[in-house]
């Protein structure tokens, strides 16, 4: 099985995990991307929005007999979706959900509307012009089209709110939920069926990415995620699409045990190597899918703690 990852950057641990079951190719705009030194084949490519980028990706897929293309950079997702059939013509499956899901995930306001329409509990969210004059603090201000944890701010009063509404581009304002934050690493097959959902508690975050985390067997979270994925698949199927591949879903569990979903990302999360090691071996399941084998859902996983540290490669 051959896999191509885009925007490999520093995703060394992800590559090491996937290499246990596949030959991994990577591409990036920089030949100095650390992960470029760990793939089986590397290609320096144009920026995602430059003419010829997608044609280059398709050419790599054809030349290297790529089975799965897994994009890692959110800005390119919609463009790649529109080339799904062209990729299939060269034998490559785009492991990415359809356009409907991408649009829901990439826009925090659309995510909120989806949650409300499908009775999924989530923090109350406001657009800039809809914030009530009397509101309970603290609040969260973040861009509706932001990636990861960048430009996410907690505000404690009206003065701070007014400042960050000007500071943050395209802001939305969310109710602040006090509780434990979980990331759920999820994998769906090509028809939107959930293969596994592994919750991990975020113990420590550095520069927007988890540095300490542990997997937890919380059945309430797992069932809530499966229900959420079912609703996403129903929405996608109405447009002839599917929920496909990796999803990174975030929620907060408050002191009463209530689950509030805050974000859905249709890609691998930064802390996903922990779920690989706990039993959610994406590579093994993708290998079965590529060989047209029946894939049984994962019914158990190990509770592990991950402690991340910096490393270097010398060239």
Image (tube, helix red, strand yellow):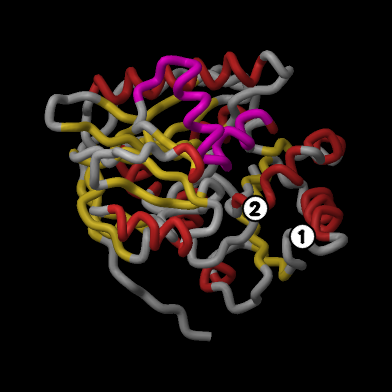
Q: Nearer the viewer, residue 106 or 217?
A: 106
Residue 75: mark in rendering: 2
Task: Using a 10 Å C-alpha cutoff, classify the residue at mark 1 as few (fewer than 14 neighbours), some (14 to 19) or many (20 or more).
Answer: few
Q: Nearer the viewer, residue 49 or 142?
A: 142
- Magenta segment boundaries in residue numbering: 100-121
Q: Which residue is at a point 36% across and 74% down the rendered structure image?
A: 311
Horizontal relation, residue 201 to residue 125: left or right: left
Number of marks in the image? Answer: 2
Residue 249 placement (x, y as % from top left): 41, 36
Q: Main secondary structure of the magenta part?
A: helix
Q: Which residue is mark 1?
A: 49
Q: Which residue is at a point 30% across and 38% down the rendered structure image?
A: 134
Label 2 – label 1 distance at C-alpha: 9 Å
Q: Nearer the viewer, residue 41 or 107?
A: 107
Residue 247 placement (x, y as % from top left): 49, 36
Q: Which residue is at a point 54% across and 58% down the rendered structure image?
A: 169
Residue 108 placement (x, y as % from top left): 51, 40
Residue 235 placement (x, y as % from top left): 60, 18
Q: Residue furthest front?
A: 133
> Which image quarter is the N terminus in?
top right
Q: Which residue is at a point 73% across and 18% down the rendered structure image?
A: 240
Marks 2,1: beta carbons within 8 A: yes
Q: Secondary structure at mark 2?
A: helix
Q: Does residue 118 sit above or below 100 in this rendering?
A: above
Can residue 185 be seen at all in this image of the molecule? no
Task: Using a 10 Å C-alpha cutoff, classify the residue at mark 2 as few (fewer than 14 neighbours), some (14 to 19) or many (20 or more).
Answer: some
Q: Nearer the viewer, residue 162 or 140?
A: 162
Q: Residue 76 in magenta?
A: no
Can residue 65 be seen at all in this image of the molecule? yes
């Amino acid at each position: 099985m051959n896999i191509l990852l885009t925007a490999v950057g520093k995703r060394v641990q992800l590559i090491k995990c996937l290499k246990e079951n596949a030959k991994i190719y990577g591409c990036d705009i920089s030949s100095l991307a650390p992960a470029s030194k760990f793939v089986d084949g590397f290609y320096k490519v144009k920026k995602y929005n430059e003419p010829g980028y997608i044609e280059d990706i398709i050419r790599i897929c054809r030349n290297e007999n790529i089975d799965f293309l897994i994009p890692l950079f959110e800005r390119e997702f919609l463009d790649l979706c529109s080339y799904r059939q062209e990729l299939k013509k060269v034998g490559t499956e785009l492991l990415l959900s359809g356009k409907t899901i991408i649009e829901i995930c990439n826009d925090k306001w659309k995510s909120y509307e989806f949650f409300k329409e499908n009775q999924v509990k989530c923090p109350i969210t406001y657009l800039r012009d809809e914030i009530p004059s009397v509101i309970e603090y603290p609040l969260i201000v973040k861009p509706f089209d932001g990636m990861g944890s960048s430009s996410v701010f907690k505000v404690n009063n009206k003065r701070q709110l007014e400042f960050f509404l000007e500071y943050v581009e395209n802001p939305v304002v969310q109710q602040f939920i006090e509780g434990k934050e979980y990331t759920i690493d999820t994998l769906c097959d090509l028809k939107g069926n959930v293969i596994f959902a592994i919750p991990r508690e975020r113990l420590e975050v550095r520069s927007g990415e988890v540095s300490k985390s542990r997997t937890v067997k919380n059945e309430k979270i797992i069932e809530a995620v499966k229900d959420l994925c079912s609703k996403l698949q129903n929405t996608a199927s109405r447009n002839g699409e599917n929920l496909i591949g990796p999803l990174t879903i975030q929620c907060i569990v408050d002191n009463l045990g209530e689950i509030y979903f805050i974000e859905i990302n249709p890609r691998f999360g930064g802390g996903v190597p922990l779920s690989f090691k706990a039993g959610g071996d994406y590579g093994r399941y993708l290998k079965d899918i590529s060989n047209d084998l029946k894939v049984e859902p994962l019914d158990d996983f190990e509770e592990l703690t991950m402690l991340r540290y910096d490393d270097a490669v010398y060239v």
